[in-house]
Amino acid sequence: MPVFSSVSRLAAMALAAALLAAPARAGTLYDDLGGRAGVQRIADGMLQRALSDPRIKDKFQDADIERLQGLLMLDFCKLAGGPCRYPGRDMATAHADLNLAPRHFNAIVEDLQDSMQAEGIPFRTQNRLLALLAPMHRDIVAPPGAKPEATP
Ligand code: HEM
């Protein structure tokens, strides 16, 4: 009996340890980016870099930067699997009047990479966020010569 109970206690402890460790090991991207505070710093870092990036800063001339700052963080949080609701406009609508080309998109992605690098985010984790943003390209970048409204 003592053998059995110590074995089952060990089993219970192992199970508890596994359950406790599971969320950390499974790690949503949101967790791996440092949770809310980490995602906020990454989004802020990207925006600050974009605002002084000679390749794209003019595009932000008429934007409400404080609002954009809040929405960017919520967008990244939700995309990364965090507990956030994104209340902003969809990507196509938000960027429709900006006439963005692939080079603008690439510039902001570089600014995001620099921001994540500065936060010490490992490349593998950086790439997980970039992979989620890549499909937005088709909504954000205007087809050359096409009116955004004409895009289905
Ligand atoms: C993966 C790339 C991008 C993401 C995830 C992203 C995300 C966002 C989000 C969440 C908003 C707020 C939507 C709203 O206003 O309701 C927004 C707006 C905006 N974005 Fe982007 N964006 C991206 C690329 C770009 C690029 C390449 C530029 C310009 C170079 C840009 C310039 C702007 C501007 C100026 C606004 C504000 C528009 C306005 O206030 O009317 N974005 N973006």
Image (cartoon, helix red, strand yellow):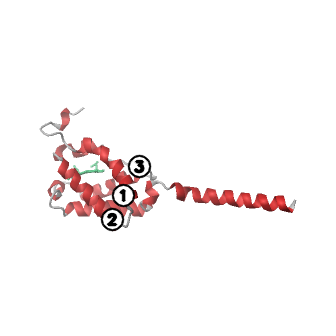
Disc 1 vs disc 2: Cβ atoms closer than 8 Å? Answer: yes
Q: Height in image: 36 above or below 86?
A: below
**Numbered disc in front, either 1 or 3:** 1
Q: Answer with left or right where residue 111 lies relative to residue 58.
A: right
Residue closer to the observer: 47 or 6: 6
State the mark number for residue 116. none
Q: Amino acid at mark 3?
A: Arg
Q: Is mark 1 within 8 Å of ligand 1?
A: no
Which residue is rendered at x = 39% and y = 53% of the image? 128
What residue does disc 2 label?
A: 117
**Residue 137 can be seen in this image:** yes
**Residue 89 can be seen in this image:** no
Q: Amino acid at mark 2?
A: Gln
State the mark number for residue 126. 1
Residue closer to the observer: 55 or 71: 55
Q: Amino acid at mark 1?
A: Gln
What residue does disc 3 label?
A: 85
